[in-house]
Amino acid sequence: MTILDRYIIKKILATFFYVVLILVAIITVIDITEKLDKFVINNLGTASILGYYGDFIPWIAGLISPITVFITIVYVTSRMAAHTEIIAILSSGVSFNRLLVPYFIAGFIIAGLSFYLNGWIIPKSNRERIEFELQYFKKNNMTSRSNIHMQIEPNVYLFIQNFSSQNNVGHQFSLERFDSNRLVEKLTAENIQWDTAKHKWTMRYWKRKQVDSIFRIQQVGAAFELASRGDAMDTTLAVTPEDFEATDRGYDGMTIDELTEHIDKMRFRGSTGVEAYETEKQIRFAIPFTIFVLVFMGVIVSSRKSRGGTGFQIALGFMLSFVFILFFTMTRTFAESGSLPPFMAAWLPNGVFFILSMGMYKYVPR
């Protein structure tokens, strides 16, 4: 590594962390202003608020890191171009491809750090942030879910008409067990409640019906015989109240390993909304490559000395950042609605901007 490489890498990393700090500070101030009334209404103390923003700030920093990298590259390179440093470097015999090496080294450092933090560290702090927001900011969004259908074990299917997260009570509960696509047992209850002390479910006014071994298939209308019933009974199911919670962006609090496990569980149960979790997992793997693509494009956009000065190039960088965010948001929305495969949603912006960068690369002065 040459002195020039160290010089460029140092400028990129220093500027990157400075820009992240500035943007996070601005976003945090805006967020505090928007939530100030909620803090007052809920009588939250200073320690609680500081704890919340201790989890909020890393999440925002990880969220904006790809675009911050692009802005950093455009700013650093345009400043070097304005001071004729780029021209001097190329005139000394250094090729443009060789000039890209320190940029990609800095990009690799940022991408590796971003992947590790977004994949395993930030999700853990997000759990407390999400719990805080659900408790104080989104009380109406977490109270209930309706028409819950899922497979909880092989050939065992659960249905709850309505579940309240406030008291962990489900109404119109039904559990059906199949054998070779034939219903063999059905357990119903008017309501079912989670017992936090026993870590079990309590069913009230329950009935259990089993397929009659004599009639079975011959008489569909008389295929059941009443086996038992009761007023209350404790039982263990392969689900907990957390499986029924309707939380927005619940994947924010999951590491990559937990995401994989949760996706497998949702697929097994036939749960809806699995596309959002699959998209999030793909995005976490795509972000490091996004950083490399944006580093490459940033150098190309800003390496030429502009008559309009660095201001024009920085403005161009912001415009391209806006286009990328818009494109990324659109593909993610389509994926979460099931209109686009999650893999394509995560990697399509990278592919499109890489092709665009390669087209621009042909016209860069060397």
Image (cartoon, rainbow, N blue to C red):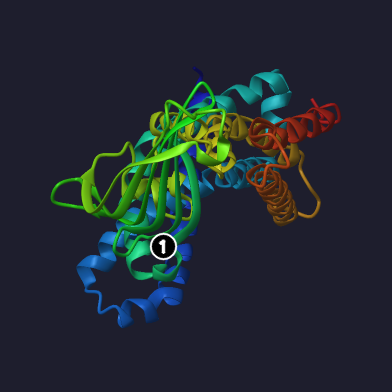
Q: Is residue 101 above or below residue 49?
A: above
Q: Is residue 283 above or below residue 48?
A: above
Most distant residue in the left direction: 197
Counting from the top left corner in percent of width and height, residue 183 is at 49, 32
Residue at image coords 74%, 35%: 353
Left or right of residue 94: residue 262 = left
Residue situated in front as seen by the camera: 268 or 97: 268
Kind of residue at disc 1: Met
Counting from the top left corner in percent of width and height, residue 196 is at 18, 52
Tell me the element at label 1. Answer: loop
Residue situated in front as seen by the camera: 331 or 265: 265
Counting from the top left corner in percent of width and height, residue 295 is at 63, 34
Task: From the image, tell me which residue sits under label 1.
Answer: 142
The reply to whether residue 7 is visible in this rendering is no
Residue at image coords 45%, 44%: 251
Left or right of residue 26: residue 286 = right
Residue situated in front as seen by the camera: 193 or 244: 193
Mark 1 neighbour class, 10 Å CA radius: few under 14, some 14 to 19, many 20 or more: some
Left or right of residue 314: residue 237 = left
The reply to whether residue 265 is visible in this rendering is yes
Counting from the top left corner in percent of width and height, residue 311 is at 70, 56
Locate the C terminus and report the quarter of the image it occupies: top right
Residue at image coords 45%, 65%: 141
